Image (tube, grey):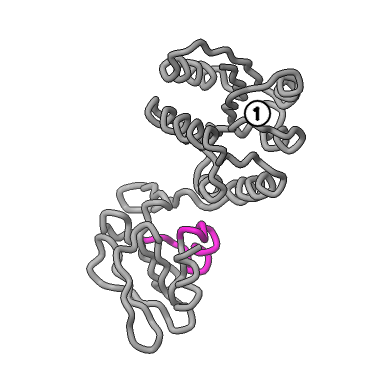
Amino acid sequence: MNILILEDEIPAYQKLTKCLDSFFDIKITHDWARTIVDGEKFLKENTYDFILSDIQLLDGLSFDLFDKIKIEAPIIFCSAHDEYLFQAFNTNGIAYILKPYSQDDFNKAINKYESLFKKGNYNSLDSNTIDALKSALQQENTTYKKRFVIKKASGIQLLNATDIALITASGDFCLVIENLGKRLTISQNLGSIYQQLNPKKFFKINRSEIVNIDFIENIESHFKNRLLISIKNHKEKVMTSSSTTSDFRKWLES
């Protein structure tokens, strides 16, 4: 079996070879490229049973390589990218191992694609799929606020955006309910904070409250086309306004 490894980081390459040795009980040969240029040369001169590919190589994106050369062999991407790109891979049925991965993660990906390829159910990458993956990567790379600095009498506390469950306006300040139910104050108004947050995770349900989708426990119908939302570790329910309910429903399914 002949395999192409596209990986710019030496430790990551070494890990992949160890995973290959642990998985296969037959003789494995492989080529290794750290750049698009070298990868293109290998692909023009050889055929492969599998391709294990990182997304970011030393001289660009592996997507660009696969856009130039039609690939018939299954491609399994190995990368630390998640969020939008992970969703795009799942949508297009592409095998994807999220770093840091285990031997078990690796084995499952190989087994899945061996099965699909043998049954003739494997769809090779086309230009439309590659464009969709590039678009997802670009969206993922959009910068959103990762953490807030909370000034307290005892010093400064860092609050990760992913730990925010609910934000409530309070004049020129905002009260934040974090993942364990603790209340904190951010010295910014609600509109300013909302512009800095990832719109895939946070939604402004009314004029004074923002919720994080990862902490929504239950949603129930209420009068006048409103929804009552239960937030993890927060006793009081919050409610959409009648004007935001429709967009909120669509956001939940996006």
Q: Quadrant of residue 127?
A: top right
Residue furthest bottom in the image: 224
In the displayed structure image, the side of residue 80 where residue 165 appears, left or right: left
| Front one among 9 and 114 | 114
Q: Which residues are magenta?
A: 185-201
| Front one among 153 and 124 | 124
- Which residue is at a point 73% across and 34% down the rendered structure image? 70
- On the image, the x and y values in percent for residue 223 come to 34, 87
- On the image, the x and y values in percent for residue 19 come to 45, 20
- Give the labeled residue for mark 1: 57
Examine the rendered structure and indicate whether residue 218 appears above or below residue 127. below
In the displayed structure image, the side of residue 237 where residue 74 appears, left or right: right
- The amino acid beneath tag 1 is Leu
- Which residue is at a point 41% across and 32% down the rendered structure image? 108
Magenta residue check for 96: no
Q: Quadrant of residue 219?
A: bottom left
| Front one among 25 and 87 | 25
